[in-house]
Structure formats: C-alpha cells, structure tokens
C-alpha cells in the first residue's frame, strides 16, 4: 500500500514518525513524507522520500502585525491550563476562547490554504491508501478526507488538545443552539467546500480515524479513542558516539538538556549549571555557543557538549533535567532514567505531573524555576531509590508495547476497514 506521512517543518515533530515510516517501508510499502520545503533535507537525511509542499506564511518576523498577533496568540495557547484536574476542569467560555484563538492562529496558520492545496494536489495524484499525520498537521486529515484515504493521527505526548476539545464539545451541547459555536468544525467544513469535496466535516478530522500512540499507556489521558499502541523507538538524527561516552564516569551522571525550547523555559542555564556542579555527580549539559561563553569557568564535573545522541547517553545516566520534549522524555522512559521536567507551558506540566503520579520523576512549574530549587530536586532523583524503581516500572511497561514492525499488520487491517478510495496498492 501507499502511505503518506505529514509533519510540521521541525525535526522534533518529524523524528517521532521515522521509526514507523521505516517499519512500513521495510514491510514493502511505499512511503512518502510531506512537509514544507524547510524540512526536505532533514527528511532525505533519514533515507526517506520527501514531498515538499509550499507554505505561504514565511518567516513570522517578516509578517508585521500578523506575526505579532501570532506570537501573542501562541503565548495564550501555550499558557492555557492544560494540567487542570478534576472531572470537568474548565468552563465553556474558557474553552471557546481557546478554540477561537487556536484555529486561526495555530491550526489555520500552520495548515494554511497554500499548504493544504499543495498537499491535496499531491494526494489526489499519488492516491495514498493511508495518511499518517502528526497532531499539528491537520492538512493530512483534510487530504485524506478529500481523497477517501484512511488516516490516523500519531501522538507522541499527552493528548492535551483533544482532551480540551472533548470537554468543549460536551459543554457546547449544553448551550442554547443560538449560543453554540465550533470554530474547528467551521474551518474544516469551509476548507472541504473550497476544495470541492462532497465529504463533510467529521470529528475524526481532529482525532484521526484511529490514534497511533507512542507513549506508555499509564501516562496517557483516558480519552476513549480507538488507539494502536506502538513502542517509542528513539531517533535522534545523524549521530556519532563520542570517545568520552565510552568510559565509566566513576560516579553518578546527570544529563541536562533544554532542547530548542531553552529560551521558553526561562532558566539561566549558566546559573543552573553552577548550582548543579555542587552535586557529587558528573553533569553533562547540551548547550549552544552563547551559553558556553556565558557559563565561563565551571568545575571539572561539568561537561558541556553541543550534541550527544540521547539514546547512547541516557543508559549511562542516573537522572535527566529537561524541558518536556517528547523525544527526550520518551528516550528517558525507555532507559529507565528518573526525570525532572521544567514545566513552562503547553503539555509540559501534564507530562511532569504524570511522572510524579507514577513515581518516575518530578515536575517544577515555571514559577519555581530557581537554580537552587532545581539542584535540590535533582539531588532527590539521584539519592532516593524510589524514583529509579518508578522509572524501571515505566520502562517495563514501554517494552511490553508492540514495536513499529509488529503494528504494521494492524495498520494494514485498519486501512482495509477504513479506506474508501477503492484501491489498496500492492506491496513493493
């Protein structure tokens, strides 16, 4: 069969798709990866075939007022209280406001008409049997709906947006008809009409006909969605194991990485490293050149690196401090490493609180991100055996989940059940 993956043009969104894409490819299926041209070299660097689709927005810094509105809207969406607990944690007005902001400035901007049209044109010509889309590229769901392909959503972190939307729909049904709105459905319905599709909006354009979830089951939000569990397989991009990593450090080792979100986290990395250096441990921190210069002279137990493959580093670590990147968290889970998540918005607090609930880590919210606080929490992760036990339980759970190769027959069956384009292509 033919399988089309769609991804936002950022490697952190694309890399979680790579193991499943290769599993399908090595099973004999044709695979293509569609994204904006900025991701083409990254895609081809993974050995897969890229389909560049144009994106009319351009650089946000060149958009003037529109760029400013996008930034402000993103800040609102990022700061929404996704971690709220309880049976019904939000009211209708909160969730309607979130939808009204998220649709035009996030989903609509990242999946604008130019991108959608280019993706639909390719999909109509190539006729995939399955479209796999990561959570920010709803254009994949649109293209599947237009062409009749089966489609699924790949989730690699807490499913916060669908959790909020399900509560929004529940509360909307309680409103008087004249007070009901659904910005997401209206945008997608309007897009389908513009494309000349007879297919109307269906909620699976938001959720996928099924979800492929790479997170351990105990860390998932219970959303009652049809789900295919698949084990996370780390992919860090091109990597080389450095010589120093082959030697035993002779003491505990702590990894510190804030990924591409360092500026969002709000921590002074140089100050944080100075405090962590007080621990009886080797501190391995991934930093950029500016942070390296700002850090100045640090004790010998602090090692600054620009990049090191986490799949090779983390098996040697006793704890990790990070920003809640889904790949970072998942790789730590696979190697049973206790985690300290610095929660700065989006899904990071949901991740951190979930790890706390199962005893595999700690979470420090943005208001408490003080270097001394973080040092004490890292000391707990390294010194209290309960965190290592919790991390091992999570590892065992993850290893029991089917691998990408093992779920390929499941996907083949689901495509046969859901596809309506009338032709499932032969392997090869």
Image (tube, rainbow, N blue to C red):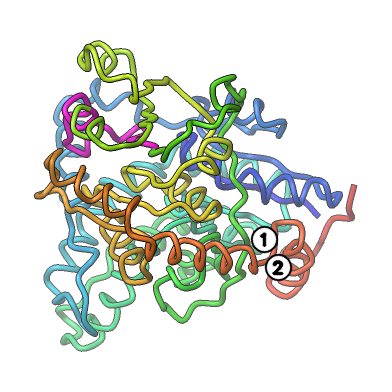
Q: Which residues are the magenta region?
A: 255-273
Which numbered circle lies on residue 407? Answer: none
Kindly indicate the quadrant of the structure image that contains residue 132.
bottom right
Q: Which residue is mark 2?
A: 419
Question: Which residue occupies the foreground of this view, 157 or 335?
Answer: 335
Spot occupied by residue 382 in the image (x, y as percentages of width and height): 35, 50
Q: Nearer the viewer, residue 140 or 272?
A: 272
Question: On the image, which quarter does residue 294 sit in?
Answer: top left
275 to 126, vertically: above or below: above
Please state if 118 lies on the left or on the right of 219 as rendered: right
**Residue 397, quarter of the rendered image:** bottom right
Q: Is residue 267 magenta?
A: yes
Q: CA distance from mark 2 to mark 1?
A: 5 Å
Proximity of marks 2 and 1: CB atoms separated by less than 8 Å: yes
- Residue under pointer 1: 149
Position of residue 337 in the picture relative to residue 61 (left or right): right
Q: Going 43% across and 59% down the picture, which residue do you hit? A: 388
Q: Secondary structure at mark 2?
A: loop
The tag earlier along the polypeptide, 2 or 1, is 1
Disc 1 packing (10 Å; few <14; some 14–19; many ≥20): many
Q: Position of residue 340 (x, y in %)?
A: 31, 50
Q: Residues within 10 Å of mark 2 (few under 14, many from 20)?
A: many
Residue appearing at x 15%, y 48% in the figure: 366
Residue at the extreme front: 250
Tell me if 213 is positioned left or right of 164 in this view: right
Residue at horizontal 33 percent and vertical 43 percent from the top? 321
- Judging depth in this view, the residue of 10 and 380 nearest the camera is 380
**Image position of 276 with respect to 103: above or below:** above
Q: Give the image location of residue 334, x and y in percent.
A: 55, 54
Quarter of the rendering occupied by the N terminus: bottom right
Residue at screen point 59% across, 19% down:
243
Q: Where is 412 relative to 322, above or below?
A: below
């Amino acid at each position: 069969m033919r399988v089309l993956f769609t991804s936002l043009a950022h490697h952190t969104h694309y890399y979680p798709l790579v193991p499943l894409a290769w599993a399908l490819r090595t099973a004999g299926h044709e695979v293509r990866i569609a994204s904006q041209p900025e991701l083409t070299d990254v895609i081809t660097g993974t050995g897969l075939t890229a389909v560049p689709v144009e994106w009319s927005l351009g650089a946000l810094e060149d958009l003037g007022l529109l760029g400013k509105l996008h930034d402000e809207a993103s800040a609102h969406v990022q700061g929404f209280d996704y971690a709220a607990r309880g049976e019904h944690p939000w009211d209708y007005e909160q969730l309607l406001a979130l939808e009204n902001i998220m649709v035009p400035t996030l989903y609509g901007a990242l999946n604008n008409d130019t991108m959608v049209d280019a993706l639909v044109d390719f999909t109509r010509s190539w006729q995939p049997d399955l479209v796999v889309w990561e959570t920010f590229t709803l254009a994949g769901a649109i293209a599947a709906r237009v062409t009749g392909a089966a489609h699924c959503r790949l989730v690699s972190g807490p499913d916060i947006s669908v959790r909020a939307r399900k509560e929004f729909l529940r509360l909307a049904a309680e409103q008087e008809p004249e007070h009901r709105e659904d910005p997401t459905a209206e945008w997608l319905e309007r897009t389908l009409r513009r494309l000349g599709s007879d297919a109307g909006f269906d909620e699976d354009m938001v959720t996928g006909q099924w979800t492929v979830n790479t997170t351990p089951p105990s860390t998932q939000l219970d959303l009652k969605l049809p789900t295919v569990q698949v084990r996370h397989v780390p992919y860090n991009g091109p990597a080389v194991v450095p010589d120093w990593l082959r030697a035993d450090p002779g003491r505990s080792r702590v990894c510190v990485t804030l990924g591409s979100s360092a500026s969002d986290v709000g921590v002074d990395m140089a100050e944080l490293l100075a405090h962590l250096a007080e621990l009886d441990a080797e501190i391995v921190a991934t930093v950029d050149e500016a942070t390296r210069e700002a850090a100045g002279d640090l004790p010998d137990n602090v090692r600054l690196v620009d990049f090191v493959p986490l799949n090779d580093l983390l098996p040697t670590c006793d704890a990790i401090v990070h920003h809640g990147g889904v790949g970072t968290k998942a790789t730590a889970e696979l190697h049973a490493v206790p985690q300290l998540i610095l929660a700065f918005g989006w899904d990071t607090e949901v991740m951190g609180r979930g790890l706390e609930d199962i005893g595999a880590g700690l979470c420090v919210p943005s208001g408490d991100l003080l270097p001394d606080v973080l040092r004490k929490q890292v000391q707990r992760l390294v010194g209290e055996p309960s965190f290592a036990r919790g991390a091992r339980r999570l590892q065992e759970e993850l290893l029991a989940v089917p691998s990408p190769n093992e779920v390929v027959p499941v996907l083949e069956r689901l495509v046969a059940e859901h596809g309506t384009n009338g032709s499932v292509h032969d392997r090869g």
